Image (cartoon, rainbow, N blue to C red):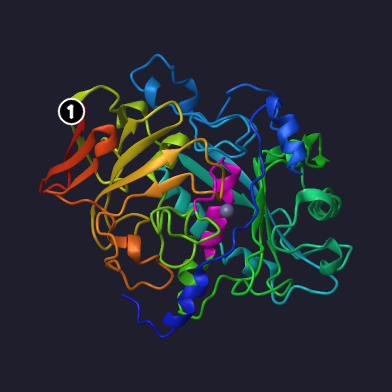
Amino acid sequence: MQPQPERSRNRRRIRPRRVAALASVSALTLAVSASAGTGHLAPGGTAAGAGPVAALDRSSTLGPCLINGHPAVQMSEGIPTPGGYARSTGTVRALTVMVDFPDAPGQGKAMDRFHEFFPQTRKWFRTSSYGRLDYRPSTPIQDWLRMPKAFLDYGIDRGAPFDPGYRELVQDIIAAADAKVDFRDYDLLNVLVTPNAGPSALDTVLSVTFAGNADAPVADGVPVANASFVYSRQDDGSGTYDRTGYRVLPHENGHVFGLPDLYTQEGGGAVGHWDIMSEDWGANNDLLGWHKWKLGWLDAGQISCASGTGTAEFTLTPLARPGGRKLVFVPLDARTGYALELRTREGNDEAVCRPGILVYRVDADIDTGMGPVTVFDSREDSGGCTRSPNVHAELSDATFTPGETFKDPARKISVEVASADVSGTYRVRVTRG
Ligand SMILES: [Zn+2]
């Protein structure tokens, strides 16, 4: 446990929503996304999503659990993830540039900025993906890449749309880098902005991702469609920046792989610290099992779809450990369902203070930042079990432990945590009336 010298500051971790990750799923969404001011289209209307999930057949036993959202949802929890995003399995090459400006010249070495995020980000993905995502950052330009215009001239502030500021910035990055970079060699772009450009992340979080953006400027014949921009330093004074400050990058890269934001305008109260797409400040955390399935990091054999009536029993092994069943999904309809998984303090999950079965609702019809996932709290108003800085406390003890039951009487669904054995495997009993 960390001492809490800055506890009063932690309340400020409730951030305004970053408008991020604008992507749409098919040509059908053209009118909708254009009127929403995004105009970003993923190529084609196919379900050529990333990873093995795309190969799943709707008639398989997992078919009823392949929930999907309305095409107007820009960034959905639905499975499979539509095309246009960076692939999330195998070797993924991340072009990483460090950028500065005439009015905000880089201080210190550009590669020191790079090392605020690496190798930690690469390791984070390797751990979370059970080795399925081999994330390779590449820095063909090791000095600050100077932009031709002043930072202020790009008009970048929180929630800035892609046009015109980010389009100009991407065009200027392409122009400055093109002599040394073949953009066809990379799956995504990381722009690590000099921390002295723009406001402190304590005041305004500018970090943003534009994902699935086929309308992005073209370099070497390919659109720079998946790009994450990181600003400032997420240093809240708790003394953990050198350990945890990199975590904004795996969050932003989560968007380039198609994951939505799980925090809302009200902050992290929907999911708490159970997913890095909810909270990327503070102690390390993992992704939900749902996200790991969506990204192709779990096999079909590691998922169970509890769609039938009656009682069925399942074993679950800790999500952070490779192998075994990781996720039971209880579909409610074609768009929503309940997910069950076992969370323990290991792997990337270093803040878990009450190991047990996490129960949450996934709604593929709810867009990024609007609350597509909601964790059910087994102990409402308990205050939680963590005192770790920047960890949403109330939901930290949300898990269900042996003997406890999650109930949805209206739908005649109950989930009983039957037992836990010495190896750490849990048994859950799902009853559908
Ligand atoms: Zn985000």
Q: Looking at the image, which residue is at 29% across and 41% down?
A: 340
Q: Main secondary structure of the magenta part?
A: helix
Of residues 285 and 32, the one drawn nearer to the viewer in this rendering: 32
Hey, what amino acid is under mark 1?
A: Ala
Give the left or right position of residue 69, taking residue 207 as reference: left
Of residues 57 and 310, the one drawn nearer to the viewer in this rendering: 310
Q: Looking at the image, which residue is at 30% across and 38% down?
A: 326
Residues in magenta, as a range? 246-262
Answer with the quarter of the image where residue 103 lies: bottom right
Can the viewer see residue 39 in this picture? no
Is residue 57 positioned above or below 424 on the image?
above
Give the left or right position of residue 65, taking residue 433 as reference: right
Give the structural element (helix, strand or loop) at label 1.
strand
Residue 80: x and y in percent read: 50, 28
Can the viewer see residue 320 in this picture? yes
Please identify the residue farthest to the front as the structure is shown.
Answer: 410
Of residues 382 and 152, the one drawn nearer to the viewer in this rendering: 382
The image quadrant where one finds the N terminus is: bottom left
